[in-house]
Image (spheres, rainbow, N blue to C red):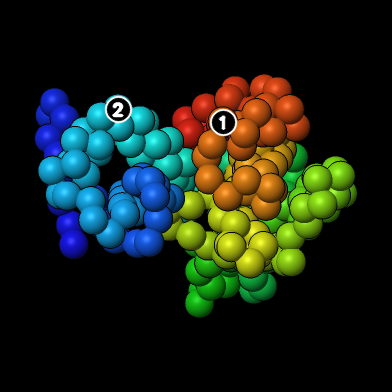
Amino acid sequence: MTGFVQYGSEKIMYNILFVDRKSLGITVYPNRNVEVKAPLNTTLDKIQKKVKKRASWILKQQDYFLSFEPRITNRKFVSGETHYYLGRQYQLKVINSDINKVKYTGRFIEIYVTERGNVKEQLQQWYREKAEIWLKKLADKHIERFKKYNAEPKKVELKRMENRWGSCSSKGRILLNPDLIKAPKACIEYVIIHELCHLVFRDHTTEFFNLQTHEMPDWQKWKMKLETLLA
C-alpha cells in the first residue's frame, strides 16, 4: 500500500507495511524510497500525520542520499580533455600506436591506441586497475581500525554503480565504486569509513553519525569535496 503527503512544493511518496509491532517507524533507503512500518491496527490518517510531521527529516535524508551519488559527466576522450586521478586533474594525450596501453606520466595520462582500440575502454580499465590497488589498500587500513568495534566486513569488492559510491549489505559485504579512484584519498577514506560504520549501526541514526565523526572528525569536508569534485 502506498500514500503521499504534500510538504510545501515537495510531494513525499511512501510505502506502508503493516507489521506486528507497537510503534510506527519511518525508514529512508539509499534509493530514496520511504517505507513506513506501522502496527496492524494503525489508521491511514494517523500514518499520514506522522509522515507529515517527519517530512523535513525525510527530505533531508533523501537529499543526503542524492548528494552521495556519482555525477555523470559527458566526456569525449580526446587529447587535451582533463580527467581526474586521486583528486588531481590530468590532460589526456591520445597517441596513435601499434599497441594499446595507458601510461601515467605525472602530468598527462597518455593513451596509446591502435586503429581498432577504444580510448574510453582503455582509460576505464586503467582506472579499474588503479582502484584495485588503492581502494583495497585504504580499505584494509580502516578495516583494521574497526576491529575494536567487532565489526569486520565479510568481503570488500569493487563494483560500478550508477547511483552509489559505496554500499554495505546486511550480510556485511561492502561494495566500492571504482570511480572513487578519481577522488582524493581522503574522499575515498570517507566512503570506506561510512560503509564500515554501517557494520556497527545499520541506519543513519545519531549513534551512526557520532561514530563516523569519531573515526573521521572532518568527514563533512570530504563528503562535500566528493559531491562537487567530479561534476
Q: Nearer the viewer, residue 86 or 15?
A: 15
The residue to which callout 1 is attached is: 206
In this picture, residue 211 sits left or right of residue 20: right
Q: Would you identify the image quadrant in which residue 88 lies?
A: top right
Q: Residue at x 73, y 27 (%)?
A: 214
Q: Residue at x 25, y 37 (%)?
A: 50
Q: Nearer the viewer, residue 86 or 192?
A: 192
- Residue 202 sits above or below residue 51 on the image: below
The answer to whether residue 48 is seen in the rendering is yes
- Residue 21 sits above or below residue 90 on the image: below
Q: Quadrant of the N terminus?
A: bottom left
Give coordinates of residue 94: x percent, y percent: 56, 55
Give coordinates of residue 223: x percent, y percent: 56, 31
Q: Residue at x 42, y 42 (%)?
A: 65
Give coordinates of residue 151: x percent, y percent: 77, 53
* Element at label 1: helix
**Residue type, label 2:** Ser
The residue to which callout 2 is attached is: 56
**Residue type, label 1:** Thr
Question: Count the marks: how many?
Answer: 2
Q: Which mark is residue 147?
A: none
The answer to whether residue 184 is seen in the rendering is no
Q: Nearer the viewer, residue 167 or 109?
A: 167
Query: Is disc 2 surrounded by few (<14), some (14 to 19) or many (20+) residues within 10 Å?
Result: few
Query: Is disc 1 surrounded by few (<14), some (14 to 19) or many (20+) residues within 10 Å?
Result: few
> Which one is earlier in the sequence, the residue at label 1 or at label 2?
2
* Element at label 2: helix
Q: Residue at x 75, y 32 (%)?
A: 215
- Residue extending farthest to the bottom is 116
Q: Quadrant of the C terminus?
A: top left
